[in-house]
Image (cartoon, rainbow, N blue to C red):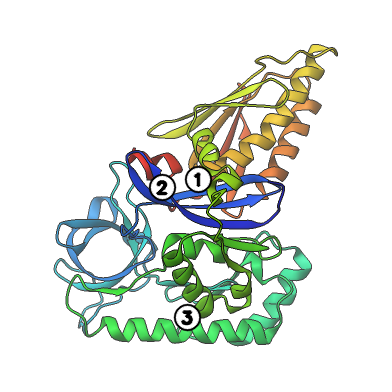
Amino acid sequence: MEEQGTFLVTKLPLNGKEWIVSAFYENGRAAELSCSPPGAGSLLGNIYVGKVKNILANINAAFVEIADGVLCYYPLTEQEEPLYTSPKKSGKLATGDEILVQVSREAVKTKAPTVTCNLNFAGKYLVLTTGKKGLGISAKLGQTERLRLRQLAEPFLSENFGIIIRTNAAGKDAAELQEELSRLSALCQRTVETGKHQTCFSLVYREPPSYAARLRSLPKDRLLRILTDDAVLYEELSSYLQEHQPEDREKLVLYEQEAPSLSSVYGLSRALEEALRERVWLKSGGYLVIQPTEALTVIDVNTGKFQGHKKQQDTFRKINREAAAEIARQLRLRNLSGIIIADFIDMETKEAREELMEYLGAELKKDPVKTTLVDMTALGLVEMTRQKRQKSLAEQIYGA
């Protein structure tokens, strides 16, 4: 279906059980996919009263227990001041201290979840932070817009919190930003005060369901419609939008046709199947091989079935360009992150390699998640990094 900017949420059977699947479609193709089992909410973004289990001075970190037996990694290098739930004479963190922490990264394979005392409360246009008191602005915004937003937001700064201006704030006026900031600051104050009166391991703040919270990160100018075919999910999305994004509430639609199903209309099952395959075919006949490992993700570009009638180097140039666009899409679609190494087809000229890097960089900038094009090594391997907070699509489904 050729339709730009549709976000859909539905339930599908996967890997022997029913999942809540959310997807964002642009120009008829799935751009983002995410899965979660019903009732099994993610820890990411939740705020707990945790207890310091031990401190590891050699790595400048601690482990904080947020529930019975649930240990989280707490990097001391990033913390300006722990949020103690009760007054303490010494500011030095000690074993047994109870502190307010937020899960900033999910557990991945053998790595424990990561927590922070720099509490973040995200809206559609702003993020309020308790630990970093300055003003940050999305690097994806142009210089003129960054300057305009800085001038609008600087008067809002307080000694109690910092502000990060998100990409979606482009074009917004001071009143709209102030309205969201007021809501976020009230939520922050309420959460911190509540935490001071809660017992150890209490869940003080629960992040909205991941399929709802994803709406605040989607480009506002490309989100045209929100669809679900499940009445319960419809009510949850409606409540979330009413409280957090009232300007998008009218975009929510309950799909009530029995046939064809919402999943069939958008080819969701097929999109999921293809996003879990190792091999991705390109229109030219070339293909990618995507292999996540423990330390990094490796992507190999192959000529495959391509039958070019021009010079060999022109052929390689064409395949590499198509591969670059598809790699950028697959990183977002599969939620791949960390270190990514791509082995493109060798090209002889420096001009062709520079052209490829420039094009790949432009494609990566379309990703809402911070993605950095690092360099091309002497061996012709392209290095990239993508910010990691949540599990990849494969890890969500298979627990890999």
- On the question of residue 132 being in view, the answer is no
In the picture as drawn, the residue positioned furthest to the right comes out as 310
In the figure, 69 relative to 159: above or below? above
Please say if the residues under marks 1 and 2 sit with CB atoms less than 8 Å apart. Answer: yes
Quadrant where the C terminus is found in the figure: top left
Residue at 69% of width from left, 38% of height from top? 360
- N-term mark: 3 or 2: 3
Q: Position of residue 199 (x, y in %)?
A: 17, 78
Q: Position of residue 335 (x, y in %)?
A: 50, 45
Please say if the residues under marks 3 and 2 sit with CB atoms less than 8 Å apart. Answer: no
Q: Quadrant of residue 193?
A: bottom left
Q: Is residue 115 left or right of residue 259?
A: left
Q: Nearer the viewer, residue 216 or 255?
A: 255
Secondary structure found at label 1: loop
Q: Position of residue 354 (x, y in %)?
A: 76, 32
Q: Circle 3 is placed at which residue position?
A: 161
Q: Amino acid at mark 1?
A: Asn
- N-term mark: 1 or 2: 1
Q: Position of residue 233 (x, y in %)?
A: 44, 64
Q: Amino acid at mark 3?
A: Phe
Q: Quadrant of residue 270?
A: top right
